[in-house]
Image: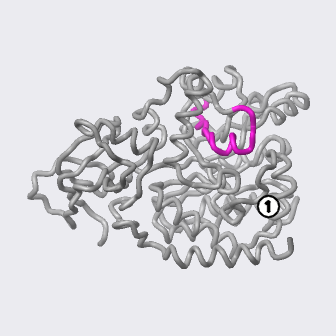
Amino acid sequence: MGSGTRRFTDTWLIDDSGVAHRGDFLLHQDGSFSDSKGDEDVIETIDGSNRLVTRSLQNWHTHLGMILNRGTGEGLPLMEWLETAIFPLEKRLTSELVEIGTRAAAAEMIATGTTFACDMYYYTQTIGETLAETGVRATLCGPITDGLTPNFKPGSGDALRHMESLITGPSPRAGRIEYGVGTHSVYVCEEEILLKGSELARKTSSMLHIHTSETRKEVSDCHAKHGMYPIEYLDSLDYFQNSDEGGTVCAHCGWVTKKEMRILAGHGAHAVHCPTSNQKLACGGTMSYPAMKDAGVDVRLGTDGSASNNSLDLRAEAKAASLVQRHDHWDARILDPEETWSLATKGSEDWVTWDLSDIRMRPWGRDGRRLLSNLIYSGASVLDVFVEGEGIRRDGVTLTLDEGKVSRDLESSVEEYYSEL
């Protein structure tokens, strides 16, 4: 079934304010919805009596191809994990491996209700072409990090030129796949690389993506070297791409001062909370959501890579975010279900339906008042996913890829990837 308006009958729908409604609704191709009178011209009518309709989830910090490394280096702290398990492996990456990993990551995203990823990984052109086939949306910030990028010679500037060609060239799927610039972090990138990345993003009005203040060591090392904390240091370089130009995504922000929060807010930067990855790698600190909110920072949610999180399930990430913020601040009122869901779906124009026959969604409660908290804290299976009115998953089956083949390809590729280890 193609794109267009669909009618859902006798269904529950949670609107952008987190309020549950019961009735017959039209989901339009432009992402809007309206009540149905039953006589509209639609391409399909769907029995929604066992469905909950919500906005799709939005994953603002990923390394999609790292699904190849899921379960690698378990039990290691961040820097040891990167330097002994991840960076050496990534030097052996190929375009073919990244394609297989990206397809597997897309399968997991769709099956768990996510339709957008802001990604930073190697072989960015391959990622874009692969995701275009799956129907999801993405902003792909290709790394220009000198010395780590496996498909470009260190010091050649080829990674920077390649990303400029992708950003300024045709999208593999206009309206769904865009490109941006990835500068890994202040501890990996020298000042020259940070400036070149920022200059390219500004020149092309594209997204700029960086890891910031993920660990206490990163923060203390930056201060010892530059006399400033990471976000202060980046600001001193005029690094930030303002929101009206293309925007900057700052992932993690676990060790950030209030002054730095004001800097982020002033640039309209997206600060991405990645609580599961931070806890799993024992970073010792997670973003302070209340302080970020008070400073006026735009906060989003991200899973980070499957290697540090083991999952791309943003619904589960929303649960983790709500719980860790309440725990850390001794306040059970922080990130209630409505605000948590808004954080996880912010900016979504797409729709997901969840299986209400799943026992985890019971009881619904009077007027459906328990539906959202059940979904966030208990979970449910995804039945349908609609992007721009196109059904890319229907009745629990993803249509744009073969999950069985994707799984087999991932398994065999990992055997090759790790064959010399």
Q: On the picture, is 284 further left or further right than 12? A: right
Looking at numbered disc 1 in the image, what kind of residue is underneath it?
A: Thr
Please say whether residue 141 is visible from this viewpoint.
no
Q: On the picture, is 256 further left or further right than 382? A: right
Q: Which residues are magenta?
A: 267-285
Regarding mark 1 in the picture, which secondary structure is present there? Answer: loop
Residue at point 75% right, 60% down? 72
- Position above or below: 99 against 82: below
The percent coordinates of residue 392 (x first, y second) are 40, 66
Choose top left, top right, bottom left or bottom right for residue 16.
top left
| In the image, residue 360 lies in the stretch drawn in magenta | no
The percent coordinates of residue 77 (x first, y second) are 81, 45
Residue at point 47% right, 23% down? 333
- Position above or below: 258 against 153: above
Q: Residues within 10 Å of mark 1 (few under 14, many from 20)?
A: many
| Residue of label 1 | 149
Please say whether residue 303 is visible from this viewpoint.
yes
Q: Nearer the viewer, residue 110 or 292?
A: 110
Choose top left, top right, bottom left or bottom right for residue 66.
bottom right
Q: Nearer the viewer, residue 181 or 244?
A: 181
